[in-house]
Image (tube, rainbow, N blue to C red):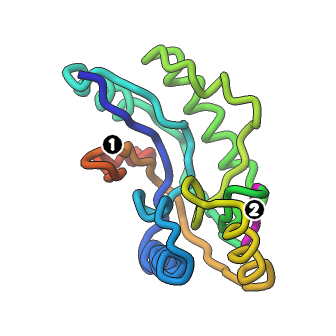
Amino acid sequence: MLQKYFIAIIPPEPFLCQIQEIKKSIFLNYGTKGALRSPAHITLHMPFSWEEEKEDRLVSALQNYSFNTEFQISLSNFSCFEPRVIFIDVPENKTLLQLQSDLVQYVKKHLQLFNQSDDMRGFHPHVTIAFRDLKKPIFYKIWEDYINKSFSASFNCYQICLLKHIDDKWETYQTFEFIK
């Protein structure tokens, strides 16, 4: 049976909880709940389908992936992809860009996952707080509330996560440290 997965960085506490509270506030004030279906994250490889019976191969390949250094990620303020996505921005980070590029090449070679290369938008790291069920009129109301708000966080990244779509939401399925 085909299952959905994606690969991401999940911020540690207390930032994970803080971002979840922002998403809950948006839901309570505007009724948009799409972003509540996954933990706060920076997507490294977009969702893909994989045979659940071959999940061990997927997990094993990701366990064997190595990135040679822990690095810092900053989260700074809010931005958007008008008119459907509002997010916390990730300022330019060359090490994060290298991680994402290396990971995409690795899974392409070792798992034959090609869908990421079909995404012509390129990699723009961010943490989504509202999307999917966000209609244009609501987008502009939320964006008006968040355009001048500030958010700031910084954390050390030393792992990636495999998320799995379970019961209509994304759950952290496995975590892989790349410092060995």
Q: Looking at the rendering, in which quadrant would you find the N terminus?
A: top left
x then y, percent, for residue 135: 65, 60
Q: Which residues are magenta?
A: 77-81
Between residue 72 and residue 168, name the one nearer to us. 168
Q: Determine whether, in the image, residue 38 is placed left or right of residue 82.
A: left
Residue 80 marker: 2
Q: Is residue 141 in the magenta section?
A: no
Q: Looking at the rendering, in which quadrant would you find the C terminus?
A: top left
Q: Is residue 79 in the magenta section?
A: yes
101 relative to 21, above or below: above
Decide: few, some or many residues near mark 1? Use Cα within 10 Å; few <14, some 14-19, many ≥20.
many
Q: Determine whether, in the image, residue 53 is placed left or right of residue 34.
A: left
Between residue 150 and residue 178, name the one nearer to us. 150
Name the residue at 34% across, 49% down.
175
Name the residue at 40% across, 48% down.
161
Residue 164 marker: 1
Amino acid type shown at disc 1: Lys
- Marks 1 and 2: which is nearer the front? 2
Name the residue at 27% across, 46% down.
166
* Residue sticking out furthest to the front: 137
x then y, percent, for residue 88: 66, 68
x then y, percent, for residue 81: 76, 55
Q: CA distance from mark 1 to mark 2?
A: 25 Å
Q: Determine whether, in the image, residue 118 is placed left or right of residue 171.
A: right
Name the residue at 30% across, 32% down.
59
Predominant secondary structure, magenta span: strand
x then y, percent, for residue 126: 65, 58
- Answer with mark 1 or mark 2, whichever residue precedes in sequence: 2
